[in-house]
Amino acid sequence: MAGLKNYYHLYVIFFLCITTNCGMARRSSSQAVKGAYWPTWASYFPPSAIDTKLFTHLYYAFLVPSNVTYRFEVSSATAPLLLNFTSTIHNKNPPAKTLFSVGGGGEGPDIFSRMASSSSTRKSFIDSSIEVARTYGFDGVDLDWEFPRDAKDMENLGILLQEWRAAVQKDAKLTGRSPLLLTAATYFSVEFFLGPVIRTFPVASISENLDWVNAMCYDYHGSWDTSATGAHAALFDPKSNISTSYGLQSWINAGLPRNKLVMGLPLYGRTWKLKDPKVNGIGAPSVGLGPGNRGAMTYSQVENFNGENNATVVFDMETVSTYSYAGTSWIGYDDVRSTTVKIGYAQALGIRGYFFWQVAGDKAGKISRQASRSWIL
Ligand SMILES: *[C@@H]1O[C@H](CO)[C@@H](O)[C@H](O)[C@H]1NC(C)=O
Ligand SMILES: *[C@@H]1O[C@H](CO)[C@@H](O)[C@H](O)[C@H]1NC(C)=O
Ligand SMILES: *[C@@H]1O[C@H](CO)[C@@H](O)[C@H](O)[C@H]1NC(C)=O
Ligand SMILES: *[C@@H]1O[C@H](CO)[C@@H](O)[C@H](O)[C@H]1NC(C)=O
């Protein structure tokens, strides 16, 4: 029986695949997205190190507008980095598309909340974003507002996207160039169902005005809960709705067209310190953070740690995730195997593609290469 249970999810994927024809019909009209964010602090992995055979879209992370004017005041130190990013990626063989991402988890929601709340500040932001994209040679802009806090913010986000799309169309007409791409990084689920303020993304406006959504399907567990280990990017969670399968389905159920949905994949792990080294599964009692920077490690660091510490590596079929442990150190992450199963799931759902946070976490390109190979065109 245990064996049967373990393979249950693979049957689900296979079944989805037959019943949806693996999404082939739906996908044929739009090019697959194989995205990745490049954070500017990853100086050890410059844009020139990115293998563009593995990616269709690369995101410069991040730019933040002025919190007074809501315009991008690009400094003389930043301008060459922007130009270097776009020219490096565009000159590669093959070239990939470039977008710059606005905000990021470190920025917080306030600036966006204020910017989106009035038409004059929205216009300053929108016009400036288009100007920056055109000046520095980007193919598009990505909004990473983490996160709209209430229903009013969500409504204003919907209006912002509508006005942004109109401005992008106008710019395309005026310049005779292809319209800039517009995307957004969002919560893994269409609805914030956990906190005290339940709110839902404006799906109608998103469907109409964005090229696609990057659903951030990770950080389900982490340093904010040190009482137990967790699979921070689990595909399935038998006990809760905090999982990638639930998140992706929620967007589809809310009416987002499948070809506008892109699944997030982490190139990092989250770590805990086990209470008892002998109790070391997912959900095992823990007493604090494990190794790494505030309980996080890039995939490359996890690989090194596992090797140096002779860690035991376990692929968990039930959640579709990987974890490793050595002594009291415990790391939950995705490896080549869990990533491959997730990609099978995403294709069975018929969604547009996947993206990674973040490209420098996989220095040797092991996961990126396998992901690109497993996404069947
Ligand atoms: C804008 O940013 C500056 C510098 O970080 C900060 O001192 C100021 O309080 C911010 N203004 C608002 C309105 O948040
Ligand atoms: C980008 O910067 C790197 C290192 O700073 C440099 O080697 C490279 O030539 C630059 N590339 C372009 C296209 O500007
Ligand atoms: C998961 O969400 C569904 C609705 O989408 C709800 O009916 C169900 O009770 C939730 N399950 C858990 C364990 O919270
Ligand atoms: C590594 O761990 C395995 C068990 O997981 C053990 O059999 C082996 O002897 C260990 N190797 C070293 C070098 O400690």
Image: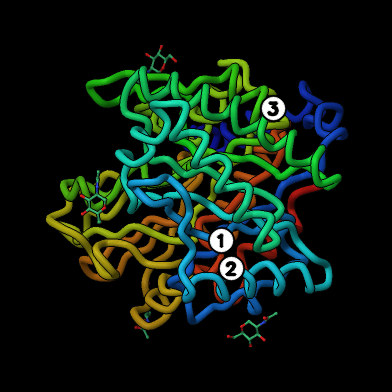
Where residue 84 sits, quadrant-wise, is: bottom right
Q: Is mark 3 within 8 Å of ligand 3?
A: no
Indicate the secondary structure of the residue bearing disc 2.
Answer: helix
- 75 left or right of 273? right
> Relative to 24, is 285 above or below?
below
Q: Name the residue: 86% across, 33% down.
A: 29
Q: Which residue is mark 2?
A: 82
Where residue 353 sits: x, y (%)? 69, 43
The type of residue carrying mark 2 is Leu
- 25 left or right of 188? right
Sequence-wise, the earlier of marks 3 and 1 is 1
Sequence-wise, the earlier of marks 2 and 1 is 1
Q: Is residue 120 visible?
A: yes
> Relative to 139, is 89 above or below?
below
> Relative to 83, is 341 above or below?
above
Sequence-wise, the earlier of marks 3 and 2 is 2
Indicate the secondary structure of the residue bearing disc 3.
Answer: helix
The type of residue carrying mark 1 is Tyr
Where residue 323 sits: x, y (%)? 40, 57
